[in-house]
């Protein structure tokens, strides 16, 4: 049922999703959708939680590696493309918009963003240990800038803004090159 909902959301968005359509696509009685999820909103919130946990676990494994931070940044950029393709980014953005007027969605998205902030803060703390202080910024502040840069990039990419109009993808990739330069400078220190 979640796979069917994900396919519909990925191809057509939240407005095209209905419990009846999910039941039809999943080949189950409509009553099963209502039994397991209660409503369209319950289905979408469950799907968001399911996809986010898998995505966050993948990121945690990647950030747990011993690879240089610059290599992990490049992999995060690769994951952005993967997350757009799977529909995770679209689902997150649609749930964010729903959260502006629905407290259930607002609370779910805020909790999800808290988990991402905690992960990125841990990575920023590691970066500070390896590369030195971030000037006036704390690791938590750097983590927020990084996380919100990716969220903004996701929004623009979903709108179909291409690289010729706004060099989003190349800008994100160049941050990785800047991190690589800092790593090289740190290694060269006596």
Image (spheres, rainbow, N blue to C red):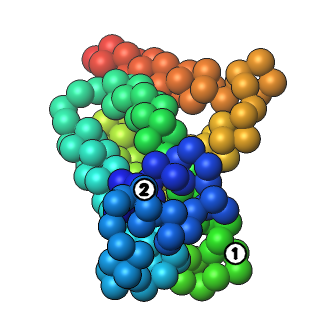
Which of discs 2 and 1 lies nearer the camera? The answer is 2
Residue 104 image point, x, y percent: 54, 83
Is residue 18 shown above or below 57? Answer: below
Residue 123 image point, x, y percent: 34, 47
Of residues 83 and 8, the one nearer the viewer is: 8
Disc number for residue 100 = 1
Q: Quadrant of the C terminus?
A: top left
- Would you say the residues marked 2 and 1 are in contact, meaning their CB atoms lie under 8 Å apart? no
Name which residue lies at 72% across and 25% down. 162
Residue 121 image point, x, y percent: 40, 56
* Residue 180 visible here: yes
Name which residue lies at 66% across and 41% down. 158
Is residue 16 shown above or below 34? Answer: above
Residue found at the far right of this picture: 165
Residue under label 2: 25
Under circle 1, the secondary element is loop
| Within-10-Å neighbours for mark 2: few <14, some 14–19, many 20+ | some
Under circle 2, the secondary element is helix
Name which residue lies at 60% across and 26% down. 169
Is residue 188 shown above or below 167? Answer: above
Q: Is residue 60 left or right of residue 124?
A: left
């Amino acid at each position: 049922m979640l796979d069917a909902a994900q396919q519909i959301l990925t191809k057509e968005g939240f407005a095209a999703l209905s419990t009846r359509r999910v039941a039809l696509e999943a080949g189950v009685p409509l009553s099963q959708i209502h039994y397991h999820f209660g409503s369209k909103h319950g289905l979408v919130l469950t799907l968001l939680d399911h996809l986010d946990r898998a995505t966050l676990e993948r990121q945690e494994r990647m950030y747990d590696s011993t690879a240089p931070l610059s290599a992990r940044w490049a992999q995060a950029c690769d994951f952005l493309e993967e997350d757009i393709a799977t529909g995770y980014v679209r689902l997150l953005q649609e749930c964010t918009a729903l959260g502006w007027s629905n407290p259930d969605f607002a609370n779910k998205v805020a909790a999800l963003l808290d988990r991402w902030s905690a992960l990125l803060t841990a990575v920023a703390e590691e970066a500070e240990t390896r590369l030195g202080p971030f000037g006036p910024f704390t690791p938590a502040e750097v983590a927020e800038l990084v996380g919100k840069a990716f969220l903004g990039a996701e929004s623009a990419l979903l709108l179909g803004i291409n690289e010729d109009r706004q060099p989003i993808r190349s800008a994100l990739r160049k941050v990785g090159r800047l991190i690589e330069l800092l790593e090289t400078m740190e290694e060269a220190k006596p």
